[in-house]
Image (cartoon, rainbow, N blue to C red):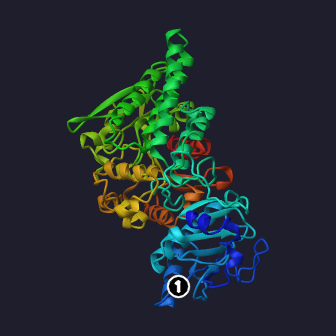
Amino acid sequence: MKDFCARTYPNAMFLFPCFLAFFLALSFLPRNAVAGETCSGFLPEDPMVRIMSLPLSGDVDGLLADIGREVSRETGLGREYITYYWQSIDRINCMGQKTEDHPVFVDLYVPGSFTTPEIGTLMTSIADNIERFAKIDKKWVFIHTHFPRQEQVYLSGEIAHWDAYQGDQNSSSAPKEASGTDTRKENTAGDGGWDAHAPQTRMHFQDGEMEFALALILGATANSGCEIGEAFVTAGRIAEGDAASWQKEWLHMAELVEARGDASFEKGHVVSAREQYMRASYYYRAALVSMLPGDSRFRETADRSRSLLRKAGKLLDPPLESFEIPFEGYTLPGYFRSASKEPGKRKTLIMIGGGETFAEDLVFYIARQAFERGYNFLTVDLPGQGILPLEGKVFRADMDTPLKAVVDYALTRVEVDPDRLAMFGISGGGGFVPQAAQHDKRIGAIAMNSAVVDAYRLFAAMPVASMTEETMKTFPSFKENTLRVIAWRWGVPMDDISGLVEANRGFSFDPARITCPALSLVGEGEYADSNVQEQQKMFLQGLPPATKRALVVTPAKEGASNHCLTENRSIMSQVVFDFFDEAFDSRK
């Protein structure tokens, strides 16, 4: 669509005066509105979505009902707030030229009470369902926000800021792509990665998958995994959506920082060496985000990340120890750091990741916050995580089995208080951890970000369920590689992404069997997804009446909206550790 607009019209903002016609109107009310109220000067009875396109044949009423039903389900807005009317035209002419393609132009009027994530979700839902039911490829959908939130544009399957398309109206050339950029387009919100939602506040990249990965890296700053200047210099050299560019630049920065660490280490500057080695470790890990397992550099890069963190860990006091847990003929690698150099048994956090995790990620995610609160910290690669899939050890439906081995190991350590053992799982770990807790009553409290009661049901409702190899090849290489790697971790052929749905059958837990205190934590932006809401409802309502429980939705206005709260570790750790502390204190 971006190419079409640039080819046919000098500037996208001048498209609308050229078209007079065919409106599909969907009236959405904010959640707290009632009929007759006004919201930020916007009348609820006015149409919010006005779609202009070529005429469609067939059952138009049925098509509208289908679109409305799905938009309501995906955005959480009640069906009673959706109305329709339809007009059509025979041909579209603009600036004296007849169009040969079939674009759909949407004017989107949104109340001021709608958050940016809600607008993004609405845009994506409209485009997805126009494609699904009207059979018009969403690469031809253009959505433009109007009063009072004129800030976003949906163009060729991509959400961006409207200002990026304001430009010089006299320009006759198309927007230039950065050198080396993969020009295939992607949807940067809504499905955003399905194990990763694009951050709700734009920091650097227009590419949603890259933006999420950058947020994850930046969030590690508080845990010595990132330096802001290094991260943005690196990001500034990366071509949008291009996996090879991402890998090249993060490997380059990792090598620079590692060299600095070596220089300090050789001169005995322990703190300086440790800090450089920790960041270099995480930058090598960052390069792996979009690297396919068949790449000759994959294992070497993972090993380099691990060896540097082990080297840095020995320079901490008390040290960050590496260990291996024997399990079914192989080993689960991990890290442990005692809460104190002094002897004694203390509270312990076992930190568990999800579908894309290396144990190193979790050190940089929460280890310092645990240590500062008097918790021993323990994390591990489970089957499916780290480089274990290279050995054929992929995710398995009985994740409680390897987690039992992890608890067994934790309780062999003299530092661990068996009565104060907490487990926290993020992303897919939001299903693994409660599954372990329903089988293993030694786990004293759990937290999830967020609860995944039935992964099969969740995956079946995602875009991945209908994703074909042809669709995959239309994505930017960064997103394409990321999806293929996740499939590999589940033992699914990398050219059969939709197979992830069936691969997740059996990845579930029974809330009725959870008897320890349980917290589900989710960012506001992610909670806007009705599928996520459904999983949290299943979790909360399924728990036994006597089980201590909490659902905390953290606010977008405080920058705590993203998947796994990657961009605000302070709020994440406040909620999680306060819950654990209160759960353990109540037993005294």
Q: Position of residue 319 (x, y in %)?
A: 46, 21
- Taking the spot 61% from the left edge, 88% from the top edge, the residue there is 85
Given residues 308 and 340, the one toward you in this image is: 308
Q: Is residue 167 left or right of residue 103?
A: right
Whether residue 339 is visible here, answered yes or no, is no
Which is more toward the observer, 94 or 418?
A: 94
**Location of residue 232 (image quadrant):** top right
Q: Nearer the viewer, residue 455 or 2?
A: 2
Name the foreground residue: 191 vs 24. Answer: 24
- Is 152 on the left or on the right of 384, as rendered? right
Q: Tag 1's secondary structure?
A: helix
> Which residue is depicted at the point 60% across and 88% down?
89
Q: Which of the 4 image quadrants contains residue 121? A: bottom right
Residue pointed to by mark 1:
64
Task: Point out residue 207 in the picture as x, y percentages from the top left corner.
Answer: 54, 52
Q: Is residue 199 above or below residue 109?
A: above
In the displayed structure, 306 sits above or below 79; it is above
- Amino acid marked by disc 1: Leu
Instruction: Report whether 497 appears left or right of 350.
Output: left
Reply above or below: 199 against 45.
Answer: above
Give the crowd class for mark 1: few <14, some 14-19, many >=20 residues within 10 Å. Answer: many
Query: Which quadrant of the view contains residue 444?
Result: top left
